[in-house]
Amino acid sequence: MKADALRGNLEGMLLSVLEPGELHGYAVIEELKRRSGGAINLPTGTVYPALHRLEAAGLVGSEWSRSSGRRRRNYYLTPGGHRELASKRHDWQEFSSVVSGVLGG
């Protein structure tokens, strides 16, 4: 999938992936890949900065944990993140409906 197609939608997809519960960064990447049937396979250099932006905006929180002796950061949605996800879903449905109407899908 072209990076241009993801522009403007990555943060909403990350929020959606975190909706069911907290995940560490690599698990976020794997869940994006799983949900997209492998079409979205983003590098850590794309996903982690986006998670940090979401955290700085107060939409995602994080905490450190240990697993098999390794420290890892787990990310989760804040109440503001849940509200933002609902807004992004509404905006996406509206946008995709309009584009489908124009393109004839």
Image (cartoon, helix red, strand yellow):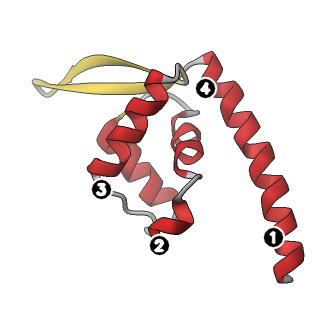
Using residue 10 as the reference point, say whether residue 92 is left or right of it.
right
Dividing the picture into quadrants, the one containing residue 88 is top right
Above or below: residue 90 compared with residue 85: below
Q: Check disc 2 and report the residue beneath it.
A: 2
Determine which residue is flagged by label 4.
81
Measured Cα–Cα span from mark 3 to mark 2: 13 Å
Q: CA distance from mark 3 to mark 4?
A: 23 Å
Q: Is residue 96 left or right of residue 18?
A: right
Of the two numbered discs 4 and 1 in the rendering, the one whose residue sits closer to the viewer: 1
* Residue at image point 10% right, 24% down: 69
- Mark closer to the observer (1, 3): 1
Which image quadrant: the C terminus?
bottom right
Q: Amino acid at mark 3?
A: Pro
Q: Are marks 4 and 2 in contact (CB under 8 Å)?
A: no
Asked whether, in this view, residue 13 is left or right of residue 23, the answer is right
- Disc 3 element: loop
Q: Residue at x 74, y 44 (%)?
A: 89
Using residue 83 as the reference point, say whether residue 103 is left or right of it: right
Mark carried by residue 99: 1
Residue found 59% across the figure and 52% down from its top:
9
Front label number (4 vs 2): 2
The answer to whether marks 3 and 4 mark residues whose Cβ atoms lie closer than 8 Å is no
Compare residues 95 and 75 and report the one nearer the observer. 95
The residues bearing labels 4 and 1 have C-alpha atoms spaced at a distance of: 26 Å
Farthest bottom residue? 104
